[in-house]
Amino acid sequence: MHRIWRNATLAKNRLYVHIRSARPLVAGAAALAMTAMMAAGCGSADDAKGGTLPRLEKSGVVKVGYANEAPYAYQKDGNLTGMNMELMKAFFKEHDIKVEGVQVDFAGLIPGLLAKRYDVVGAGMYILPDRCEAADFGPPEYQVGTAFAVPKGNPLGIHSYADVANSQAVYATSSGVAEIEYAEVAGVPKNRIKTFPSYADAAAALVAGRVDVMAQQQTGLHATLNALSSDKVEYVELSEQPKDKTGATAVGYGGSVFPKEADDLREAYGEWLANARKDGSYQKIMEEFGFTDENIPPADLTAEDLCKGNTPQ
């Protein structure tokens, strides 16, 4: 069983982090902003009628968009679970509201929210300024860095992006993700960077010997390798976290996503999450899915900070 990486680098070096996504951005910022304005123009009726939360309390059901990605929100033995999803369940249970999941591709999560296919997104989505133009985020629920998977025994001795750049290793990750940028910034030639439709596909290529190393966010990589259940590969804790194109060390913060017109729901969830941190129920859920103290964001870090690009110093 793979263990969640304890982010000693975070604690030891007091990282000045600049956030980029470990998942693809859903669309261009301009397109998202336009869609958001259209959605807000025709969807603010909830507030006029007394708010989104009262509507959900009346119906007794909330639809939550998710991308079936462990450990955030996924199906297991026919049940919908995951760190983000269990937080959602705990919050809505206090309001006698049943959670129903709506599975979509990750890239379709925010467009589906704007199209009102569901009421909220619970998928561990990174809080990024571009995404904040289209939708609102609740408080950050987790923080995470990047890790590698390599063939058993790590024959090329790869422990950092510099090691990848200075070797002849073929590097793999999912398409449209920040790990591509990390490799390019580190000087890995583009002809040695291979992208696949999903992280699972990249991992399968690693097992098949088609690539030499794959990268993914730490918690997600543990889940990918656990699902893969292969003794041909192993998890590698990085000796140094990657840099993004600004030169900052890259660490991601994820949270739940709400429509712009659902301020009451977002604020109620934020208040509940703050109380859950105080009474320990939040930590219990985090631990259940392999998150450690190092994956818990500072209590005073807000989505507003992250939407502005302001990160812990």
Image: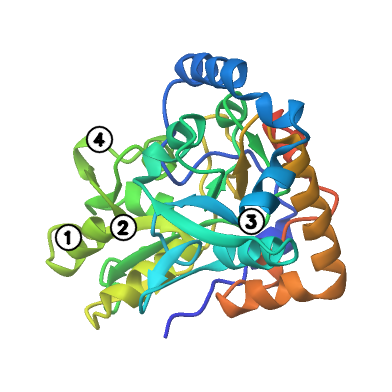
Residue plotted at (55% across, 75% down): 289
Give me the C-alpha separation between circle 4 and circle 1.
18 Å
Label 4: few (<14), some or many (≥20) within 10 Å? few
Pick the quarter of the image with the N terminus. bottom left
Q: Amino acid at mark 4?
A: Lys
Rendered image: mark on residue 190: 4
Looking at the picture, does residue 230 appear above or below residue 183? below
Residue holding disc 3: 143
249 vs 65, left or right, is right
Q: Position of residue 17 (x, y in %)?
A: 66, 43
Residue under label 2, please give it: 214
Q: Is residue 138 visible from the viewing direction of this image?
A: no
Q: Are marks 2 and 1 in contact (CB under 8 Å)?
A: yes
Query: Amino acid under label 1?
Result: Ala
Mark 2–mark 1 distance (CA, rounded to whole Å): 9 Å
In this view, the mark in front (2 or 4)? 2
Q: Which residue is mark 1?
A: 205
